[in-house]
Amino acid sequence: MPRIIEMPHNLDGMPLEEAVEFADYLGMVAVGFDRFTIGPPAIGGEVDVLAIQPEGLSWYRRKKFAAQMAIARGKRKT
């Protein structure tokens, strides 16, 4: 039977920078958990962090090759 771990948190009113760090942490926990799970890996590697806000998208961390691909396609300026 799977074990459920609860983590009390307060997301209401969390500053954006803290929310970005929290999302990054959860992504890294998922990567670490999958690393030690039996069977082939389902996830892994670096975690991209993107904030979606009413005023638009903001990358906080993006894999180098993804950023280079966006530049090559003309979707992002250097």
Image (cartoon, grey):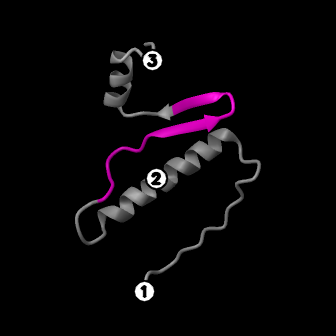
Q: Is 1 located above or below residue 13 in the figure?
A: below
Residue highlighted by disc 3: 76
Q: Amino acid at mark 1?
A: Met
Residue type for callout 2:
Gly
Q: Quadrant of the N terminus?
A: bottom left
Residue 75: x and y, percent? 44, 18
* Mark 3 to mark 1 CA distance (whole Å): 47 Å
Q: For mark 1, does the 10 Å Cα neighbourhood hold few (<14), some (14 to 19), or many (20 or more) residues?
A: few
Q: Mark 2 vs mark 1: which is more N-terminal? A: 1
**Other-residue count near label 2 (Cα within 10 Å), few / some / many at <14 / 14–19 / ≥20:** some
Q: Residue at x 56, y 30 (%)?
A: 58
Dot 1 corresponds to which residue?
1
Amino acid carrying mark 3 in the image: Arg
> Disc 2, disc 1: CB below 8 Å?
no
Label 2: element kind = helix
Q: Is residue 22 left or right of residue 41?
A: right
Residue drawn at x 37%, y 34% is: 63
Tell me residue 20's x, y (percent).
58, 43
Q: Which element carries disc 3, helix, strand or loop?
A: loop
Q: Is 56 colored magenta in this rendering?
A: yes
Label total for image? 3
Looking at marks 3 and 2 on the same chain, the residue that comes earlier in the sequence is marked by 2
The furthest residue to the bottom:
1
* Span shown in magenta: 42-59
Q: Nearer the viewer, residue 56 or 18?
A: 56
Q: Please identify the residue farthest to the left as the structure is shown.
A: 40
- Circle 2 sits on which residue? 27
Image location (x, y in percent) of residue 52 = 60, 37
Quadrant position of residue 39:
bottom left
Q: CA distance from mark 2 to mark 1?
A: 23 Å
- Closer to the N terminus: mark 3 or mark 1? 1
